[in-house]
Image (cartoon, rainbow, N blue to C red):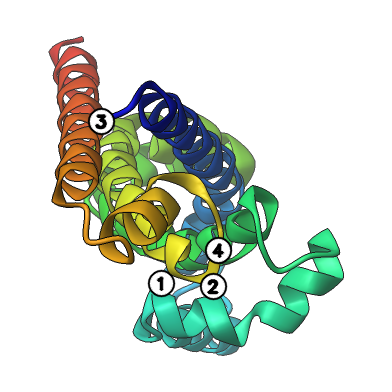
Amino acid sequence: MSPQMIDRLGQACLDTLFMVGVSAGIAVLAGIPLALFLVTSEPGGILPAPKANRVVGTIVNGFRAVPFIVLLVALIPFTRLVTGTTIGIWAAIVPLSVSATPFFARIAEVSLREVDGGLIEAAQSIGCRRRHILLHVLLPEALPGILGGFTITLVAMIGASAMAGAVGAGGLGDVAIRYGYQRFDTTVMAAVIAVLVALVCLVQFAGDRAVRRLRAR
């Protein structure tokens, strides 16, 4: 590859990391409260609200059922409203965040459900308030599982960010399509694939190591 292409590939990698990083932050900030609501508002939960739980659960399932490439196109008007554009890095962050939030929320929900109910009952028996149970029982006990789920979410988002290159979102996917696929340059395609594999392996390794440390405490 030429030096220009190497520079372009490096910039695309930084763009992908930025897209995924910002979107992942939004997914965590929105997904964890959403997961807590789904767990605590179910019948028998500490804050039961069955009707609201069903409505929110249906909305979450609806967004999860839509393939990312379809969601990417369907959200174009909303993306334009939020960012003022439908191409580029910021335009990709909107659909990435919308897609990742319900995905991560469901994974976090599973981890929260695995917390021993005896711990919650013990906290209630000594007079702990509901917010204390959420912050000092549910979240700390479920943290290793939530972190493992966040790692899975990050890996999925890296793949989705590459897919967003199909509509001019920038990043590694854009380089692969414009300079690899459209120009029949297998070297560029192979380089992009290698970078994506390296990113996924690095994220998975870091996530697994962090989970092991949390469980060892």
Q: Depth check: give the residue in front, 189 or 84.
A: 189
Dot 2: what SS? loop
Q: What residue sits 34% from the left and 42% below the top?
A: 150
Instruction: Kindly identify which residue carries mark 1.
Output: 44
Q: Depth check: give the residue in front, 7 or 111.
A: 7
At label 1, the amino acid type is Gly
Dot 3: what SS? loop
Mark 3 neighbour density, 10 Å: few (under 14) some (14–19) many (20 or more):
few
Q: What residue sits 58% from the left and 34% below the top?
A: 132
Picture coordinates of residue 181, whole percent (x, y) = 27, 63
Is residue 46 visible in the rendered image? The answer is no
Instruction: Kindly identify which residue carries mark 2.
Output: 48
Q: What residue sits 23% from the left and 34% below the top?
A: 195
Instruction: Kindly identify which residue carries mark 3.
Output: 1
At label 2, the amino acid type is Pro
Distance of mark 3 from mark 4, alpha carbons?
22 Å
Q: Earlier in the sequence, mark 2 or mark 4?
A: 2
Quarter of the image that includes the C terminus: top left
